[in-house]
Amino acid sequence: MASISEAVSSISHGGTPIPMAFLGLRGLGKTVLLNEIRHRTPEAVHLHIEVETGVPLSHSVRDEIAALRSLPLPGYELPHGAGEIRFNAPDATREEEAPSLRGALQAFNEAVASAGKHLVITVDEIQDADVPGLRSLGATVHKSADTSSKILFACAGLPEAVTAIKELRTYAKTRWDHFDLSFLTPAETAQGIRIPLERAGISIEPEALDLLVTEAAGYPYFLQRYSSAAWHDWHHRQGPTLTLDEARSAIARMRPMLEKQFYAQEFAPLSPRERRFCRELALLGPGAHQLGEVAAALGVPSSRISSLRGGLLAKGVIYQPSGGRVEFRMPLADRYVREHLGQFDDEPSKIRIRGPQMG
């Protein structure tokens, strides 16, 4: 939050805000941080981009900056009496006359500045953005730093977006604040449960707190869902203390829903060989592991499971945080697999490989 405060303060006083990147697995609060930036800049003009897989960033940006070709008028009113932005819309019949992404962003930023405002650009799911689009975006943000119409830029994405961020940062030749979001510690998780209860004048049995902390396992989204369910159970009884029975009831009710939402639907389409790969990866424990470790557990050379790895990467089940290492993309997926091993043991102990094996 300190970096957000610094960036907001900087652009509010005419300074050059440092671009920010928030990276981490889903549900760790990346989008919340982007929302916080917009919340803290109510007087700014916000350009928020949700990157879609396979959709060029230029298309998404043009859609967000008022779909220039489809505007019935050459301008529109900004919200909250912030003034009017005017465009010279290109001829809709000539695709080649459409402005470049860089040109469109610069024109939009100039229009925002002419209204006495500054521009805040936030991009979510940046790992799916195309490289040319990222370069244009980075160049625009970098160039704005030398003008009176500076841009506050922040993005969020999955861990594999670090490669794109490094390229964007190098291309823009500017300093970035890069944050890797991780799981909460047990103490932080306990605080996240206990403090809101205490503010409402409610205590919690130590055993109930321990159980909720264990079940949430430091994952903020699970913490929120389990805590809310336990609060709901307490609300029907209205006692002075949230009890162990209420915590157990909340977990029993929420766990099947969360498992279906996060894991069952993701693992269901996998082939038996892919499920076996997931089983061995999970049995290695939390976090990233060398592909060779998974291959050894399967009893085959690493070269013989490259196609399996590729398929699971394409399906979004795993990702590669660094060269030669793989990790589940879904938080706590290793725990789910270990608790449901029967669903991942459809093959013999050694995976079947087509063709001659290399020794």
Image (cartoon, rainbow, N blue to C red):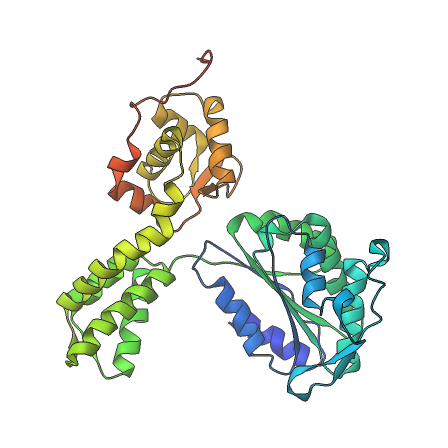
Location of residue 348 with respect to 43 vertically, above or below: above
Location of residue 315 with respect to 139 vertically, above or below: above
Q: Position of residue 105 (x, y in %)?
A: 76, 65
Residue 4 seen from this side: yes
Q: Position of residue 240 (x, y in %)?
A: 15, 81
Location of residue 8 with respect to 220 vertically, above or below: below
Q: Quadrant of the C terminus?
A: top left
Q: Position of residue 207 (x, y in %)?
A: 15, 65
Q: Position of residue 293 (x, y in %)?
A: 39, 30
Front residue (pair 9, 313): 313
Front residue (pair 182, 300): 300
Considering every residue shown, the one lying at the far bottom of the view is 81
Quadrant hosting residue 345: top left
For the image, the number of numbered tags is: 0
Front residue (pair 92, 140): 92
Quadrant hosting residue 175: bottom right
Front residue (pair 121, 172): 121
Residue 173 seen from this side: no
Quadrant hosting residue 63: bottom right
82 left or right of 325?
right
Location of residue 52 with respect to 122 vertically, above or below: above
